[in-house]
Amino acid sequence: MTRIAVRSSSVVSARATSFMRLLLAMVLIAMAPGCAGGVGDPVPPSLPQYAFINGQWFDGEGFRAATWYSVEGRLTKRPPAGLVQTVDLAGLYMVPPFGEAHNHNVEGPWNVQAVARRYLQDGVFYVKNPNDVRDFAQQIKHAINVPTSIDATFAHAGLTGHGGHPAALYEDVLRIGRYEPAVGPIERGWFENRAYVVVETEADVEAKWPMIVSGRPDFLKVYLVHSEDDGKSSETLPDHHRQGLHPELLPGIVARAHAAGLQVTAHVETAADFRQAIRAGVDELAHVPGWLIQRADDAERARLTEEDARLAADHKVRVVTTSVAGQAMPSIGGHHQHGSHAGHGTGQQMKHNALPADAASNVLKDNLQLLLRAGVTVVIGSDHAETSLAEVVHLSTLHLFDNRTLLKMWCEATPAAIFPARRIGKFAEGYEASFLALAGNPIEDFDQVQAIRRRFKQGVPLDGDLMKDAAWSAAGQRSQ
Ligand SMILES: [Zn+2]
């Protein structure tokens, strides 16, 4: 058993003291009526009631004038009894808050406040983390999933094969580049069962299942990596490093997960991975094949057919875009490996993909087009960007979708994919009183998604002190 040694030094205690002061300031701000204080602050038990007047509200097609009320954090069109604060939305354009269906950056106590604030700033209230370090995620429970912060779900440790992705990523790259600077020394091997679980046989799955579900994941993550090569010897595949779960284990794992009430998200790279995952019954694919092109033959292996797209549509599998993820993927010392999962922390030894970016983006683009034509639910996730804003901005440059389609993917389909049981992603009676007020109509001008004038989450205003925190302003606020 090894433990993470948390550094104790005067630097840390000085930081802790100023953190306590900040916390106290936030509590004092939060106690002021009708005003959210800091990110993650508790909200008083009885929320003020609001009347939102003079706003244009997105109805799934366009924008319509309406008056909505917020009562106990829920939307209603019935004027409530008692005291009501009026919020004049002065012709602004209301959209449901955005989602990020694939990112690993909501991960630990050292930066959760800054990460949450950045998401809220970009209007992204819902985040799905499809592989995290279980112990760290458990330390940030208090800071998220409250009205004054983002809401996030976690898979914890994903299932892979012996030597499969992402074991080396955690043990060799992220351990040193990302986690040791944050928490102090970590022994190699510490991440097994915390950030990845190795299963080679049905017996392994059986034996490790209680440990997997004991972490109370919100969903399960599995890794398929070049599953077309599974079982081939290393002699026939001399320079092939990337691998994942044996695909024949997947149907059994999916059945167990579904029986436990867990949806399954599969990491995929090639068209073979895509097919195996869908046939095994997974609910979501964490990538569109073509997102990662590192070798000459990867592009063709990633290319989907019409039949593949129909298979996904028939199985109602959601697919996460991650079109910017490949740009962040490095190759190390000439060997192509999966590198830093966040595009930071190991900068020195990284160099950019030697293959023309066009080859990669063409396959990805063609695949996305096929999926859309087949009616597959496509949701927004960046994997490596700071928030999903970068992903939608990139997708908009591919000219695959009109503005309305892209908006609906971001504010309707993605939040629904992250929290399927919640009433979010549209404005309707009893739905959560969460919205972004934009300066202009994003269907006419998509850039308006960045012109956020007000934010409400579950009946709590998130503007004012929360978004104008000194630390945040110093970091450089986007022009509004
Ligand atoms: Zn990822």
Image (cartoon, rainbow, N blue to C red):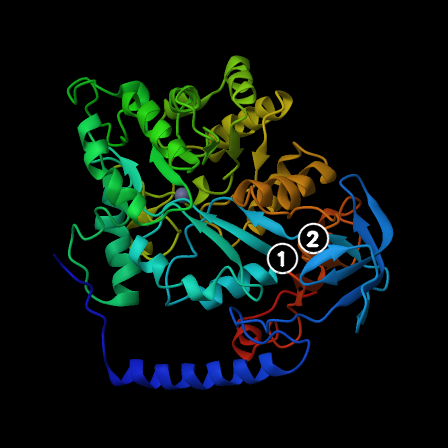
- Asked if residue 201 shows in the view, the reply is no
Q: Within 10 Å of the Cα at label 1, are there few (<14), some (14-19), or many (20+) other Cα atoms?
A: many
Query: Residue sitting at 60 percent across and 82 percent down?
Result: 31
Give percent across and percent down for residue 350. 32, 49
Give percent across and percent down for residue 162. 19, 34
Which quadrant of the picture is home to ligand 1? Answer: top left
Specify the label residue 13 is tagged with.
none
Q: Nearer the viewer, mark 2 or mark 1?
A: 1
Question: Is 461 placed above or below 243 here?
Answer: below
Question: Is 38 placed above or below 182 here?
Answer: below
- The foreground one among 391 and 410 is 410
Left or right relative to 152: residue 166: left
Question: Is 20 placed above or below 97 here?
Answer: below
Q: Looking at the rendering, in which quadrant would you find the C terminus?
A: bottom right
The amino acid sitting under disc 1 is: Gly
Specify the label residue 123 is tagged with.
1
Left or right relative to 145: residue 346: left
Mark 2, residue position:
449
Q: CA distance from mark 2 to mark 1?
A: 8 Å
Query: Residue sitting at 53 percent across and 59 percent down?
Result: 150
The amino acid sitting under disc 2 is: Val
Q: Are marks 2 and 1 in contact (CB under 8 Å)?
A: yes
Query: Residue sitting at 62 percent across and 26 percent down?
Result: 372
Q: Looking at the rendering, in which quadrant would you find the N terminus?
A: bottom left
Q: Within 10 Å of the Cα at label 2, are there few (<14), some (14-19), or many (20+) other Cα atoms?
A: many
| Ligand 1 under 8 Å from disc 2 Cβ | no
